[in-house]
Amino acid sequence: MQIKLVKDFENAKSGSIIEIDEKDLEYFTKEGHIVYIVYTDIVKKEELATKESEFKAKTEKEIVMPETKEIKQEITAPNIVVPNKEIKSMGELFQKIAKGEVIQKVPAGMSENTGAGVDGGFLVDHLLYTGILGRMMEGGVIYPKCRKIQVGDNYNGMKLPYLNINTQSTTSQPRLYRIAEAASKVATKFTFAQHDLALMKLIALVPVTDELLQDKNMLEGYVISQIKGQFGWRMDNDLLFGTLATTGTMGVLDASAAAFITQPQAHAATMTPTIVQGLINGVSASLRGGAEWFMSGQAWSLIKAQMGQGVAQILNPLAGQETLGGYKVNVVDGMLVLNGAAKDILFGNWDQYTLIEKGGLQMDISKEFYFDTDQTCLRFVLRNAGAPTWAAYTAADGKAYAAFSTTS
């Protein structure tokens, strides 16, 4: 509850308003005399009404108006030069200006571009735009399509077994046998192989001054989004061209992945329907439902010009708005240009590429490392490794099939 002192009490002055508990009221009774009133809402309203009445009772003479002063500014003529003539009035000056008899000089002294000093420059500045303009990191196109498995505690890698059957025929394993009645069964075998993957680390360490983070709106969120985009781009690049020894990932276009990809078509700089169909046919029929195209922007532009709508030689265009041969096209920033070289275009199903990860992309923020320089450090860490797990095989038609196909 609140009380208001009506007399001085110890160190508290009369008129003080104090918040206390009801059990402490006796303390404010001195020698039996009450030194307070309970400061209720009714008391507050009565005091306010009294103050308003006293104010209205004052006369206009009692209310002192602030003193006003008239400020005069002297207006002088601009810095002018009139050859061998004296100007006696402003009217004469204006007449001479109209007749072109006056030469105007650039005034000396303060200006927006003058440096600090006796001239007193730099009084204005250029506004700093609140946003940050420029390229946004593309992020991952391939990385989100991969199959991901989490590595458990106390492990820094994983063994991935996969079926390794390189032919498909009546005599390939696992083999089935037709036997006569009461004949002995013949054992069939499976052939397995294994990837032994060790987690490797991809990191980014970004120190930013505390002043920037405080003064530049949304800078922290902008930096984080850019770094995440760059992680996605780098993972795409590693999934295409990486090696187990350096990146922890077996790139499907690297020589080490030869057993998991078919190279059915050699081609010149000009793409043809035969090459397109050959690449599609290089992926196993059971995987084509989830297969997509991956190529550079320049490659897709050339293919549309060669086999798209409006091309006279193509009666039924293969290149649609976002599809080639009926399959979705993904433009990947980092793939080779379409120039007749090997592995400049990829068709495949990335669900057959397995990534092992430890917790995904981790982000930590700390001031400790750069504490003495007033900087906040953003740390990003991604631990993973990966490899394709659908081995290429040769079917009865003599063609090789896999989860991925590319040009040779």
Image (cartoon, rainbow, N blue to C red):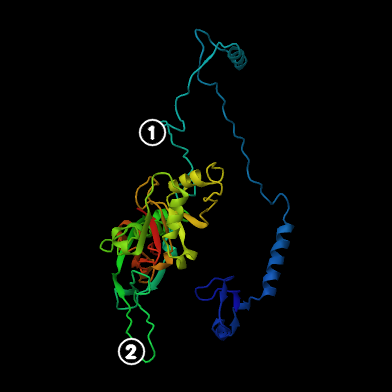
Label annotation for residue 184: 2
Classify residue 386 as left or right of residue 218. Answer: left
Q: Position of residue 235 (x, y in %)?
A: 37, 60
Q: Could you tell me which secondary element the residue under label 2 belongs to?
A: loop
Q: Could you tell me which secondary element the residue under label 1 belongs to?
A: loop
Mark 2, other Cα within 10 Å: few <14 / some 14–19 / many ≥20: few
Q: Is residue 297 visible?
A: yes
The amino acid type of the residue labelled 1 equals Gly
Q: Position of residue 403 (x, y in %)?
A: 40, 64
Where's the N terminus, which quadrant? bottom right
Q: Position of residue 343 (x, y in %)?
A: 36, 53
Sequence-earlier tag: 1 or 2: 1
Classify residue 320 as left or right of residue 177. Answer: right
Give 184 or 385, whichever is nearer the viewer: 184
Classify residue 254 as left or right of residue 90. Answer: left
The amino acid type of the residue labelled 2 equals Ser
Q: Is residue 225 visible?
A: no
Mark 1, other Cα within 10 Å: few <14 / some 14–19 / many ≥20: few
Give 157 or 209, whichever is nearer the viewer: 157
Classify residue 245 as left or right of residue 96. Answer: left
| Residue drawn at (55%, 41%) of the image | 312
Which residue is tagged 1?
Answer: 117
**Vertical order, 102 against 290 (above or below):** above
Q: Position of residue 5 (x, y in %)?
A: 59, 74
